[in-house]
Amino acid sequence: MTQLVAATDEQKRERDALTFPEWGQRLTLAQWLERERCLRTHPWSSAGMETWLWRADDGEVLASCETFNSAARLGARAGAVYSVASVFTAPALRGHGYATQLLNAVCTRLEQRPGALGSVLYSDVGTRIYERAGYRAFPAFDVVLQPEPGDAREGVTP
């Protein structure tokens, strides 16, 4: 039996260290962990970011992801759209459908929230796994915003 759970702060830090070889290669481990800590303490993240774990009965984490809650409108309806990011399964656990099961459980949970309008997933690893979870691929595009002058760390709690 498996279950979807919200990650504790300690579990988030454990996942950060585990994902480093996949996503943090341009940084040292210490830099990667600091980057992730800063991300989570930013006011935008702390207000709407959740880390989800797909866990076996024995507590082993089989897959994880993050969601970000953003205000949105669909016609006249106001609500929220959830961005799904950082889907991860440890290399030794891949190929068993854990990430697909995680995504299905997360989407089911998010759909039940009042005002939920949908979810969006951004990926740079291909579409196959996400299509199995019901997502449809669309051409990507980038929106580049010019930074505001000032200290980029302003508002980040040390």
Image: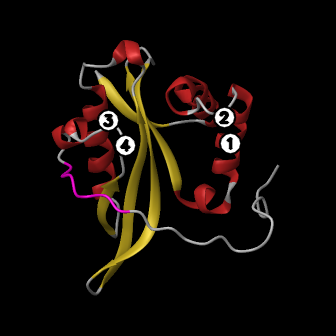
Q: CA distance from mark 4 to mark 1?
A: 20 Å
Q: Which residue is mark 2?
A: 32
> For numbered disc 4, what is the local secondary structure?
loop
113 vs 8: above or below: below
Q: Are marks 4 and 3 in contact (CB under 8 Å)?
A: no
Residue at position x 34%, y 70% in the image: 115
Q: CA distance from mark 1 to mark 2?
A: 5 Å
Q: How packed is label 3: few (under 14 Cα within 10 Å), some, or many (20 or more)? A: many
Q: Are marks 2 and 4 in contact (CB under 8 Å)?
A: no
Q: How packed is label 1: few (under 14 Cα within 10 Å), some, or many (20 or more)? A: some
Q: First in sequence: mark 4 or mark 3?
A: 3
Q: Which residues are magenta?
A: 135-141
Q: Which residue is mark 4?
A: 124
User: Identity of the amino acid at label 1?
Assistant: Arg
Q: Are marks 1 and 2 in contact (CB under 8 Å)?
A: yes
User: Identity of the amino acid at label 3?
Assistant: Leu
Q: How many marks?
A: 4
Left or right of 71? Residue 125 is left
Toward the bottom, the furthest residue is 76
Rendered location of residue 145, percent (x, y): 55, 71
Rendered location of residue 153, percent (x, y): 78, 58
Residue at position x 60%, y 62% in the image: 44
47 vs 78: above or below: above
Q: Is residue 112 visible?
A: no
Q: Could you say which quadrant of the image residue 113 lies in?
A: bottom left
> For numbered disc 1, what is the local secondary structure?
helix
Q: Are marks 4 and 1 in contact (CB under 8 Å)?
A: no
Quarter of the image that includes the N terminus: top left
Q: CA distance from mark 2 to mark 4?
A: 19 Å
Q: Which mark is on residue 102? A: 3
